[in-house]
């Protein structure tokens, strides 16, 4: 028994894009991935930022299960906009991005610039950013969904998030 | 190039179990699932609670992509313990639970008791709890990982979370 309703998801307008861009200014995210061994869903909190071109990226530890998972299967999803303890968490806006992980090699010529850029937003990362098992990974958006609460959902193309 | 280190994940002790149980008292969670069509990872925020026996559960809308996904493939993962805006989000404790979704049928004899129990923790749900496309789904823990910050990780069996 299902109620017939119009498509609840609208194409993103300028206001929705502005909200999505503001949600991307966060320093942490929830990451969904497929487990490297079992292929079942896994979830982790990751340190999140944008590269100098505005592309989502993370700094991940080689000890974390999501790092092995993303190396085995780069398809993943991010959720940005965690609500904290105040207000109704289900009406707090959040952006869900479907992404493909692309690791930055330790000898990538861009790594020094990414490292300097990351430390501006994550100064405490100086403690571990140069450990050899830590790596940058770009999370290239494929599409996204913005949920601003019941009845306020918008879909985005990869281009909309630039 | 990888640094050899001891296993960074310990078996849960009493203190870790108490922290995990306290993180389960939240009213929202991040849910990782496999998309029903593409099998790629998806992520959503869900309204979260415990049933009268302490089993994780959610109230989900038939319009949400995770509902179709969980009906097609019940393997999923939950993250509890969202950090809000204060402090270092990567040291904020969070519990990651690998779970199997089990939907509660509309005519399940337990539904009335679950409905009354849910409304105690989620009073605003009166607005939509009886819409025919909303459903309760139990998220049966298979295993869990507690991360209390760098160097403080514990693994749990399903029994540890009871």
Image (cartoon, coloured by chain):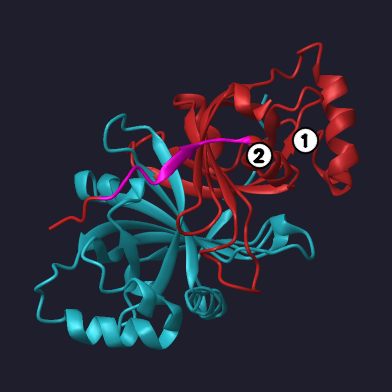
Chain colours: A cyan, B red
Of the 4 image quadrants, the one containing the N terminus of chain B is bottom left
Residue in view at x 35 percent, y 42 percent: B7
Q: Earlier in the sequence, mark 2 or mark 1?
A: 2
Q: Is residue B139 visible?
A: no
The residue shown at (51%, 75%) is A26
Which of A99 and B26 lies nearest the eye of the viewer?
B26
Mark drawn on residue B131: 1
What separation in Å lies between label 2 and label 1 (alpha carbons)? 9 Å
- Name the quadrant containing residue A2: top right
Instruction: Estimate the x, y position of residue B55 in percent, counting from the top left.
Output: 70, 26
User: Which chain letter goes with mark 1?
Assistant: B
Return the chain for callout 2.
B
Assign a secondary structure to mark 1: loop
Disc 2: CA contacts within 10 A as few (<14), some (14-19) or many (>=20): some
**Which one is nearer the viewer's eye here, B107 or A74?**
A74
Viewer can see residue B51: yes
Q: In the rendered view, tell whether residue B119 sits above or below residue A38.
A: below
**Range shown magenta:** B5-13
């Amino acid at each position: 028994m299902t109620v017939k309703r119009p498509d609840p998801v609208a194409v993103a307008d300028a206001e929705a894009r502005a909200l999505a861009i503001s949600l991307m200014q966060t320093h942490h995210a929830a990451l969904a991935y497929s487990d490297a061994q079992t292929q079942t869903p896994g979830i982790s909190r990751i340190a999140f930022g944008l590269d100098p071109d505005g592309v989502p990226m993370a700094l991940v530890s080689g000890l974390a299960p999501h790092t092995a998972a993303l190396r085995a299967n780069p398809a993943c999803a991010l959720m940005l906009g965690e609500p904290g303890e105040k207000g109704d968490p289900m009406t707090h806006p959040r952006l869900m991005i479907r992404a493909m992980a692309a690791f930055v090699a330790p000898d990538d010529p861009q790594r020094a610039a990414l490292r300097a850029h990351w430390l501006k937003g994550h100064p405490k990362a100086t403690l571990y950013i140069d450990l050899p098992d830590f790596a940058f990974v770009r999370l290239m958006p494929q599409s996204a969904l913005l949920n601003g609460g019941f009845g306020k959902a918008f879909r985005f193309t990869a281009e909309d998030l630039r």
